[in-house]
Image (tube, rainbow, N blue to C red):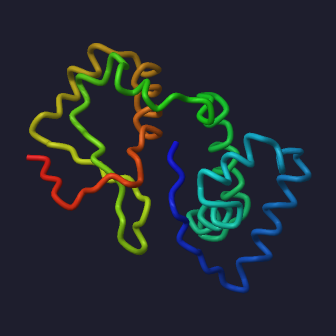
Amino acid sequence: MVASAVVPIAAGDEEWPLVAEMQERLKKDGVYGTPGTTACFEAWGGEGRCLLRVLRGNKHKVEDAMTQLYGILEFRAKYDVDNLNPEDALTHPCRPFWVAEIPGQATREQLKGCVIQVTVGRYIQPEAIVERFSQDQMDMFFILWMVSTPPASTDLSEYNPL
């Protein structure tokens, strides 16, 4: 995976105690500081950013945020996300049926480092994919696709997908 610049995330005074509660729960459950949790935090731009995003996504309900975070950690472990080879997306059997391309990453301010994906809608054939591939095959391809980011230096100034 390509590391991207992390945009600072501001937190309100009322959010930090909730983040601390999440950290304590992770410690109590023996998950805090494990390689999988550390890698997850890094993938989300750091521990504070990860926990705040999950917390905010769950309307500041710590129990709901923890359920989601544990789901994310389980998913990452199940698919061994941290050890995937992004190049495998290019040779996966689903690739010829996937009509998207990743031409580069955004370079402007708040979006810096975000992957740009281009899809030509008229070529999408969901029936062909569903008929040919199992859910597990599609899941693995999509996971590989998500980690197959282009170099941050990709110049998109003259990119025209059509």
Left or right, 11 with reference to 160: right
Look at 8% across and 46% down and name the residue there.
Answer: 162
- Eyeballing the image, is 140 above or below 152? above
Left or right, 31 with reference to 10: right
Find residue 20 and report its horizontal and vertical position in percent.
Answer: 82, 69
16 and 42: which one is in front? Answer: 42
Give the total of numbered labels. 0
Find residue 133 and report its horizontal and vertical position in percent.
Answer: 34, 16
Look at 52% across and 63% down and name the residue there.
Answer: 5
Find residue 21 and report its horizontal and vertical position in percent.
Answer: 82, 66
Look at 65% across and 53% down and name the residue there.
Answer: 42
Look at 83% across and 53% down and name the residue there.
Answer: 26
Q: Quadrant of residue 105?
A: bottom left
Find residue 47 and report its horizontal and vertical position in percent.
Answer: 71, 61
Left or right, 162 with reference to 100: left
Q: Quadrant of residue 35?
A: top right
128 and 42: which one is in front? Answer: 42
Which residue is at the far top? Answer: 132
- Eyeballing the image, is 14 above or below 65? below
